[in-house]
Image (cartoon, rainbow, N blue to C red):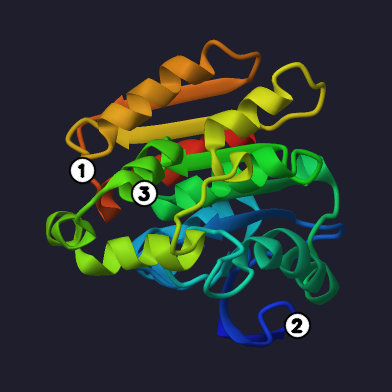
Amino acid sequence: MILRGNMFSKLLEMETGITVVAPSKMHEGNYKVAYLLHGRCGRSGDLVDYTMLPVYANEYDIVFIMPEVARSFYTDMQYGLKYFSYVTEELPQICKNMFNISSNREDTMVLGISMGGYGALKCALSKPEQYSFCFASAPVCLYLKEFLDFLRSSNNIEEIKKIYGEELINDFFYAFGSDVKWTPEDEILELAKRLDQKDIKPSIYTTCGTKDEFREFNLRFKEDMEKLNFDFAYEEWEGQHDWYFFNESLQKALEKISR
């Protein structure tokens, strides 16, 4: 079953898009739930349109909930909306009231691709009491502080916009402010270090293609995470930053969940 539509968010103070994919078969009890987060140039329905998600919902008996967060980097934006709070606080409550999904941590996971991979890691590491499993395919912004420091120290933002694209740089300003202020709450590795010695923390699985432009950062993140006390796994194989790779990665992640 695929549901596409809009719902009103009090936090966002507007209607926002949502897509839900549920198993066709009915059963007693609540379904496991996966919050599935789109990339920077995407929308809530992308993973239905470009992956085999409806097949996976039936095969793995999971309800997938896909919010829409524009190009927010899953933050409570400095110049924009409170998308991080929406995804981690309001959205789960609304969906638990509307759908037959579990409230248990062990049945709740957060998954994402590209910018959504960053968002999934941020959600899981910020609120480990909510999510038992996190999957991120080719996550970006793994070393956010370094890029924000680079922007802040630049004497020629216009030249940087020519290199990286004006829209991308503007997105960082909207999300993190005109001073592109960094906080530990936005840095994935800092969040992981806070949980290192805690009992409750999510299992994490990340993937990246060997031809992906973000591979270097993902390999570096793998090395840093392996120094910490986490149930962490990383896999890579030939692939690019595209839907072929994301679809295969998603299936591998769901296989891990089902074991």
* Three-letter residue code for mark 2: Lys
Residue 78 x/y as whole percent:
56, 67
Q: Residues within 10 Å of mark 2 (few under 14, many from 20)?
A: few
Give the quadrant of the C terminus.
Answer: top right
* Three-letter residue code for mark 1: Gln
- According to the picture, the residue beneath numbered tag 2 turns out to be 10
Could you tell me how far apart the alpha carbons at marks 2 and 1 are, in whole angstroms?
38 Å
Count the marks: how many?
Answer: 3
Which one is in front, 218 or 26?
Answer: 218
Residue 191 x/y as whole percent:
63, 33
What residue is drawn where x is 42% and y is 51%? 113
Is residue 236 shown above or below 141?
Answer: above
Q: Contact, CB < 8 Å: mark 2 with mark 3?
A: no
Residue 35 x/y as whole percent:
62, 57
Where disc 2 sits, the SS reads loop
Q: Which disc, if any, is residue 240?
A: 1
